[in-house]
Amino acid sequence: MSSSRGRTSEEHRRSTKPTSRSSRGRSGSPDRRVTTIVLIATMGAVAFGYDTGVLAGALPFLSQPRDAGGLGLDALAEGVVTSALVFAASLGALVGGRLADRLGRRRTLLFVSLVFAVGALGTGLAPSVEALVGCRVVLGLAVGASSTIVPIFIGEIAPARRRAGLVTRNQLMIVTGQLLAAVANAAIAQASSDGEAWRHMLLVSATPALLLFAGLWFVPESPRWLATHGRPEAARRVLESIRSTGESERELQTITALHPRANEPAGATQRTDRHPMRARWVRRLVLIGAGLGMVSQLTGVNSVMYFAPSILATSGLGTQAALTATIATGVVSVLATLVGIRVLRRLGRRPIMITGLIGVASSHLLLGLAFALPLGPAQPWLVLALMLVLLCFVQSMVSVVFWLMTAELFPLQVRGLAAGVAVCVQWLSNGVVALLFPLAFAHLGGDVYFVFAAVNVLSAWFVWRALPETRGLALEEVERMLRRRLS
């Protein structure tokens, strides 16, 4: 009887081993398994995109008087409501990155998905400006954490040959979320007969959060996180399920060769690696990452994504027409990101980002000139066209490289924390733009775009000086190269 039980146990173990033929047959090829994991993880990016894009369509309704269904927002209140999420996201990026290093990528994302849902429901049901701001802060914590963790998680799951294409799907899903927000806003505004349309717009954002929570139960932990936290056998099992035979063992050996303490118990590894940020080369990398975060937001992209309906209405379009036209910004962002993903397969990170920043500076210069023209029926369409050109450069060349760099630049043992710092600076820069842009546009009008043009010329110079090239290298090869170069 015991012998039979032993055979049954052994048969069960073999049937559930990730590398067995039956397992691969049920779950598909390793590449397909990785693609499924990435699709689930990027629901966090969809939530990020929707939550940052939805307010552009909600603001015209929130600005209406209370008796008309709005909350009576003025220019300053608009900036506060918009930037509340953004500044909270900067804190969420830091905390989320640190938690992801300590608790694991998957476990932290599970918690973040619940915070997403709570924040989304709270914003849609908010009875006052104060409550709305508070719930936007909660939502911002989740947005910031996911913006740090998702690209790291994808980068650690993806094989080197597919890493650029898979990590940049994070950016694709961000802009897809923004497009969905624009479409939902226009549809809700068209269908709604009262000023409370903004509530429905904000409530919809709970959907991707719930999809993320459900999907993560079917996703494994990052094998690199497992390997460096005293769980090499668990890392091996995950790698065997997402890599071809032989490739998984080679990859695990590469990880443990660069991190020799990976085979120690988890507690010992954490004690010896308590202060890895003290290394000079790591601190220099963090500064480069923080600079890239600032560069990505000083493009002024979110002056378009957050305030496009208001800007277009100022240039002569009505509110409903401006909301509908804003869908074009979402469509262009998605298409431009798809182009950027293809370009990254052929060109290096450095030339792509530098070219993008020069294009951004040129677009801002032309936008400033467009606002200097006499107000007429053609002006809003010219402004919209130039906004779309700006988005093409940002989404296809600047944003895709920034989010890819958050997954590639930093050493494994502090990847969450270091990426969190870079993303924190990105969100702080985003918040400054969100807070000041309505006031700057109200006082300077189109001249504000000349300021953006000058800033982006300086950004291109910074990238030329500071950004290392990582194309074609495994994460461990990137780490070895940067350790030698920056030590």
Image: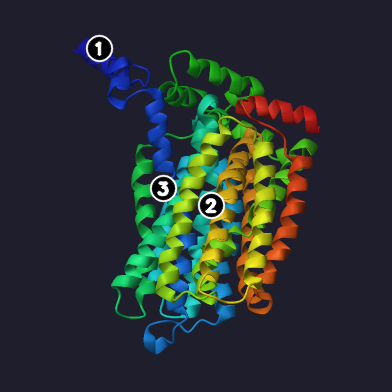
Return the mark for residue 7: 1
Which residue is most to the left? 1
Select label 1 or label 2 by which is in front: 2
Give the mark nearer the N terminus: 1 vs 2: 1
Spatial CA distance of label 2 from label 3 is: 13 Å
Residue 382 on image: x %, y %: 55, 64
Badge count: 3
Residue at 33% x, 21% y is 24
Locate residue 288: give its quadrant.
top right
Q: Amino acid at mark 2?
A: Ala
Give the mark nearer the N terminus: 3 vs 1: 1
Q: Amino acid at mark 3?
A: Met
Foreground pick, 34 / 252: 34
Return the mark for residue 145: 2
Residue 194 on image: x %, y %: 32, 80
Select label 3 or label 1 by which is in front: 3
Give the mark nearer the N terminus: 2 vs 3: 3
Residue at 40% x, 24% y is 30
Q: Is residue 160 above or below residue 53?
A: above
Residue at 73% x, 51% y is 459
Foreground pick, 485 / 65: 65
**Label 1: which secondary element:** helix
Locate the C terminus by quadrant. top right
Q: Amino acid at mark 1?
A: Arg
Residue 89 on image: x %, y %: 56, 59
Crowd band around label 3 with a 10 angstrom C-alpha radius: few (<14), some (14–19), many (20+)? many
**Label 2: which secondary element:** helix
Q: Which residue is mark 3?
A: 43
Q: Is residue 257 above or below residue 69?
A: above
Crowd band around label 1 with a 10 angstrom C-alpha radius: few (<14), some (14–19), many (20+)? few
